[in-house]
Structure formats: structure tokens, C-alpha cells
Image (tube, grey):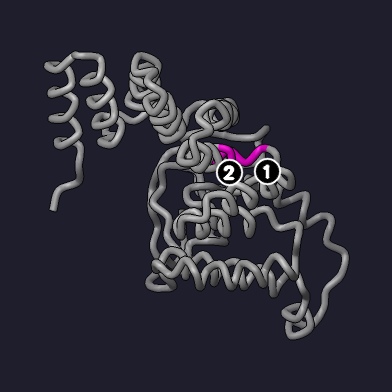
Amino acid sequence: MAGYPYLGKYRVTEGIIEDIRQSDKWIRTTTEAYPGNSGGPVLNSKGEVIGIHVGHGYDARPSNALKALLAASTSTEPLAQWQKRALVRAYVYVKRGRRKYDDGDAAGAITDLDKAIKLNPNDAEAYKYRAKAKAKLGNLVGAIADYNQAIKLKSDDDYAYSHRGMAKSELGDHDGAIDDHDKAIRLSPKSAYFYNNRGEAKRSVGDYAGAVEDYNQAIKLNPKYSTAYYHRGLAKEALGQQAAAKIDFEKAKASLPGP
């Protein structure tokens, strides 16, 4: 991936394709990506552009989808006029809201995301990130309502399903939580994070053996997943497997990044 992380110096970072999701609509890579990388090209080993990085963590939009969008473009307009469009202004509010959330200002994020949704009520991303901010402030009912709307607008959003499941768990709806984690895993079966989340939901209802199975899968997908080792240790401890639990706690500690 090539670009200007944090709008700083030009930088090229390497990685591999980890997953192709949702019928070739998205590419998930292991490449390190930061704010400012959005819009940067994703290149293969031959230097050919195979996608464009977008603001979804490690995701990129494949080049075939971009070609279709460019082919459909038939007109232009002055930049100043384009910037006044409701959808463009909504996008700016979403970006600013996400930045505030990342900086720890969940209330400020909600204010910006409210404005984004007012301008564009069909923006699934705005609902999803407003849900995250609401959950951080303890408004789990409001978070679930926003995740519901995000999923209604974008039914294949694995992240929204998994995080709605986490909110449901905190409210005591464990069956609903596990069902949401199931859906997230069906959409992205190579996500260690989603398996860990489902393992947590199972552990919360006392299904320690089922939780261990999910943590096993998470660790198989990501052998350095310290959180999954720690959670598996807790589940094994609950099963009376003290020696095995101790080994997992040691592995969790060994997998943590150094100082």
C-alpha cells in the first residue's frame, strides 16, 4: 500500500491478502494502515493497482468495482459546488465524528454523527459509529438501535453484527448475542476477533467448553492473539483445568507487545 499516513511523509507498506469478503466487494489485508492512507492504491507484487484503501481499518475496494464506478460517471461540477452537497457534508461529519471517538470524545462524536445522519439518513457507517460512541457512554439500548439501523441499510456488515452481539450480552440477551456472533462469523469466517467475541458470549452463559472451541479457532487464525489466550485460560479455569489455564495465561503474557 502506498500513501501518506497521518498526512505525513510518503510511505509504502507491505502485507498480504488475508481475506476476500462479500463476493469480491472487499479485500482484507494485513498491511498496516493509518488515517491518511484512505484513497491510496493497493498494489500487487507486479506494481499493478488491485484496489484502493478505504477508511475501514485494513480493507480495500477492489479495482474492478472502481472501474465500474468510473464508467458510470458522466458529468462534472465545480469543486465548491460539489462540497455543498448534503452527502459530501455528511461524509465530512462522519470523518470528524470518528476522529473525535478515536480521541476519546464519544459525546462530541455523537454530535457530529447526528448531523451526518440528518444530512444522509441512509449512511450505514454513521449509524455504526454512533452506536460505538453510545456504547462507550453506557447507552447500550441506543447503541443496539443504531446497529439495527446500520444492519438494515447494510445487511452484510459483519462488524455491526458482532458489536450488536456484544451490546446484547451486556444487557443479558445472551442468546441474541450468540446469534449475532454466528452471523458475523458466517460473513467473515477467517476473523479471529469474531470467534473471540462469540467465545466471550458463550463463557458468559457458562458454556465453557463451547467457549474454549471458539478461542481455539481464534488462536488458530491468529497464534499471537493474547486476549484469546487469556480468555481461554479463564474458561479452562472454570472447567477445573488449572494447569492448562496457567499455560494459557503464560502464553497470553508472552504474546503481549513489548515496551
Residue 131: image quadrant is: bottom right
Relative side of 149 to 186, left or right: right
Residue 81: image quadrant is: bottom right
Amino acid type at image mark 2: Ala
Q: Is residue 138 above or below residue 90?
A: above
Q: What residue is shown at x 59% (from left), y 54% (from top)?
A: 142
Q: Residues within 10 Å of mark 2 (few under 14, many from 20)?
A: many
Spot occupied by residue 96 in the image (x, y as percentages of width and height): 54, 72
Relative side of 72 to 186, left or right: right
Amino acid type at image mark 1: Ile
Of the pair 217 and 66, the residue shown nearer to us? 217
Q: Main secondary structure of the magenta part?
A: helix
Q: Are marks 1 and 2 in contact (CB under 8 Å)?
A: yes
Of the pair 139 and 154, the residue shown nearer to us? 139
The residues bearing labels 1 and 2 have C-alpha atoms spaced at a distance of: 7 Å
Q: What residue is shown at x 78% (from left), y 76% (from top)?
A: 85
> Total number of numbered labels?
2
Q: Is residue 241 above or below residue 95?
A: above
As drawn, which residue projects farthest toward the front?
172
Q: Residue 243 got which mark? A: none
Q: What residue is shown at x 58% (from left), y 72% (from top)?
A: 111
Spot occupied by residue 235 in the image (x, y as percentages of width and height): 28, 22
Is 236 part of what is drawn in magenta? no
Q: Which residue range is magenta in the image? A: 156-161
Q: Is residue 208 above or below residue 5?
A: above
Spot occupied by residue 172 in the image (x, y as percentages of width and height): 49, 35
Q: Residues within 10 Å of mark 1 (few under 14, many from 20)?
A: many
Q: Earlier in the sequence, mark 1 or mark 2?
A: 1
What residue sits right under mark 1 in the picture? 151
Secondary structure category for the residue under label 1? helix
What residue sits right under mark 2 in the picture? 160
Q: What residue is shown at x 73% (from left), y 69% (from top)?
A: 118
